[in-house]
Amino acid sequence: EAYEKAIKEQKIEAIAQPQIEVAQTDPVVFKVTVPLLPKVELGDYHHIQVTPEPVALTEDDVNAAIEQLRHGQATWEPVERPVGFDDLVVLDIESNIEDKPLINQKAVQYQVLHDLSFPVPGFAEQLPGMKRDEEKEFKLQFPLDFPRGELAGKESSFKVRVTEIKQEKLPELDDEFARGVNPDFKTLDSLRERVSADLKLRAEEKARIDFEEQVIEAVVDLTELEFPPILVELEINRLLNQRFQRLQRGNQGLDEYLRSINKTEEELREELHPLATKRVIHSLVLGKESVNF
């Protein structure tokens, strides 16, 4: 009651619940910290000059997109030769760490890719040169920053057996391939035209977003801002809630997620602080009725 009377008398516009501390008890004196409405003073942004980046789409971009579609239509055929990078192999895997079983799986399909860090960095590099039905034993150390904290820095022994080796077979670049992507495409040229148009649309959208970001940043640089820290905390809460909802859809709890990234909730909040601050600033600037780009 005393608080409400005080803010009314002082004509204070609070935007959230206050923090109340008892400064002394006899007589009773309260110390109240009140988050106030943000102060936003726009500079003269009408003369800001920001040049949008031109949208550049090359034939190489189109070819790369077509190549991705080819990989999507590829088949895997068994080969009688040693394992090479990019092959798909079928493995039996046993792994122990400190004499405790870590992995014990059979018929695991695994594509041998450069710099693949699953299940541990260096695992993929052990496979090239192995033949079908060959077994190999080796040891690898998990990095100190490995997401699963209980494994970080520890050494694990592996025993693998290659049971199948398959090589990717890409479809020919012809009209039949185009129809395989979508029956609406009767020719390879029609597929290329659609891919080119889609890439151009995405590039234009990205250029538009980048341009708007540059304009907003330029306006922010000309703006005097004062806002209570609680706005950032509320935005962090919103970001965490969004992430938590995504985790729930994937049947993963927050505690499990934090263990997987080897962070505490406080560390995650600190990590989100710069993004939340940026979003608050942008929201305050764009919320001014006088802003008109």
Image: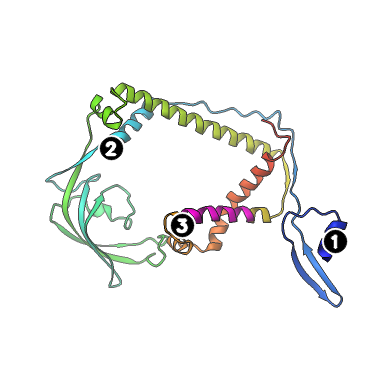
Query: Which is more N-terminal, label 2 or label 1?
Result: 1
Give neighbour class at mark 1: few <14, some 14-19, many 20+ (Cα, 10 Å).
few
Query: Which is more N-terminal, label 2 or label 3?
Result: 2
Query: Which is more N-terminal, label 1 or label 3?
Result: 1
Of residue 98 and residue 164, the one placed in the foreground of this image is 164
Q: Which mark is residue 6?
A: 1
Q: Position of residue 145 (x, y in %)?
A: 42, 60
Looking at the rendering, which quadrant does residue 95 occupy?
bottom left
Q: Principal SS element in the magenta part?
A: helix
37 to 69, vertically: above or below:
below
Q: Which amino acid is tagged 2?
A: His
Any magenta on residue 241? yes
Give neighbour class at mark 3: few <14, some 14-19, many 20+ (Cα, 10 Å).
few
Of residue 38 and residue 275, the one placed in the foreground of this image is 38
Look at discs 3 and 2 and give the one toward the viewer.
3
At numbered mark 1, what does the secondary structure look like: helix, strand or loop? Answer: helix
124 to 2, vertically: above or below:
above
Q: Which residue lies under the disc numbered 2? A: 71
| Point 53% across, 58% down: residue | 268
Q: Which residue lies under the disc numbered 3? A: 248
Check contact, mark 3 vs mark 1: CB within 8 A: no
Give neighbour class at mark 2: few <14, some 14-19, many 20+ (Cα, 10 Å).
few
Which residues make up the magenta segment?
234-248
